[in-house]
Image: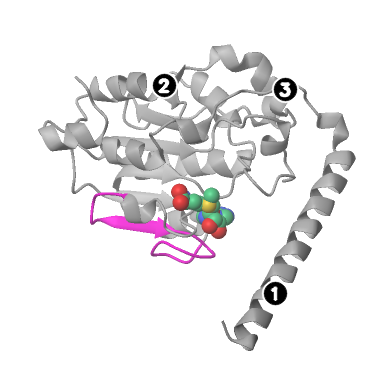
Amino acid sequence: MSVDAGASMAMAARRRKKRNLNSWLRESWLTYRHRADRCEERFDFDWRAIPHTRATVVNLLLAGNPNGRYLEIGCAGNELFDAVMTTRKTGVDPVRGGTHRQTSDAFFAQSAGERFDVIFIDGLHLFEQVHRDVVNALAALAPGGWIAIHDMLPRDWLEEHVPQISTAAWTGDGWKVAFELLASPELEFRLLSVDHGVAVIRPKVAGARLADLGAALGSERFSYLHRHFERLPVVDYAAGRDWIGSHGALHSGEEGRRSLGMTK
Ligand SMILES: C[S@@+](CC[C@H](N)C(=O)[O-])C[C@H]1O[C@@H](n2cnc3c(N)ncnc32)[C@H](O)[C@@H]1O
């Protein structure tokens, strides 16, 4: 290794250490400042031990329609976007990734009339925004289409807190939309316990509407989710796959079934 390369590696290590120290200080300060929201309860999901991910779920939703129109809200490094099987993809993100450099609100406002078969919502993780993304997605969904929402199962108050405290895993409070879905008779849904929680939604009728519980849930925090968790239709991947399959959405080819972890 040259002297220059050694010096720049040492500089990068110092920068990393400073960044880690800064984010530790920031998290400690915010944890103290928002201590009134602290909740000792937690869920013990071990996401890394579950082999299925959001990509498995999205590809499952596209399995019966492999060239379906896919829309992803919030693409970041395109980790999911690049793993989605169809070639007809639209990705919206104001910062990076996807195909459209804009917010979801701006995209939906200018794309009226465009229809998608599968819409994955993973943009700004704030309740009001996730609610708006679902309302707009319902209007943009093709008949027989599916909507999925990522990061619906925070494991503790730090992962959930708004404003954001955790710089590791942060789901925000989009989980409140799950209680709106419960209160929406025109929408069916399941909350799959994979990859930080993926809600999968299926409209029962054309023009299906999402209930608005903003006034009731706006100021609730993680402890509400923990107290009311049993009300939610949380299922593991196998049960979620069977539910999706019961709508006739699955691929019949042997290879497709194997790649999706299907045993039946
Ligand atoms: C968690 S990342 C998305 C990860 C990606 N879907 C994946 O699975 O690999 C969230 C992304 O949402 C984007 N974002 C933030 N606000 C947004 C908005 N209003 N509309 C659309 N995307 C937004 C951020 O720039 C960020 O890249």
- Mark 1: give few (<14), some (14-19) or many (20+) Cα within 10 Å: few
Q: Are marks 2 and 1 in contact (CB under 8 Å)?
A: no
Residue situated furthest front in the rendering: 1
Q: Quadrant of residue 199?
A: top left
* Mark 1 / mark 3, whichever is N-terminal: 1
Q: Is 93 colored magenta in this rendering? A: yes
Q: Which residue is at 56% across, 23% downward?
A: 179
Give the labeled residue for mark 3.
Answer: 223
Residue 90 % position (x, y): 34, 57
Q: Which residues are magenta?
A: 84-102
Q: Residue 129 appears at what percent x and percent y?
A: 58, 45
Q: At numbered mark 2, what does the secondary structure look like: helix, strand or loop?
A: loop
Q: Which residue is mark 1?
A: 10
In the rendered structure, the answer to whether residue 11 lies left or right of residue 237 reads right
Q: Return the x and y of residue 113 as percentages of the image width and height.
A: 32, 52
Give, as a three-letter code, the residue at label 3. Ser
Real-space Cα distance between discs 3 and 2? Answer: 22 Å
Q: Residue 235 or 51: which is nearer the viewer?
A: 51
- Where 181 sits versus 67, above or below? above
Which residue is the site of mark 2? Answer: 236
Q: Nearer the viewer, mark 2 or mark 1?
A: 1
Helix, strand or loop for disc 3: helix
Q: Amino acid at mark 2?
A: Asp
Q: Secondary structure at mark 1?
A: helix
Query: How far separated are the C-alphas under marks 1 and 3?
Result: 44 Å
Which residue lies at the image location 72% right of the left edge and 29% below the top edge? 221
User: Identity of the amino acid at label 1?
Assistant: Ala
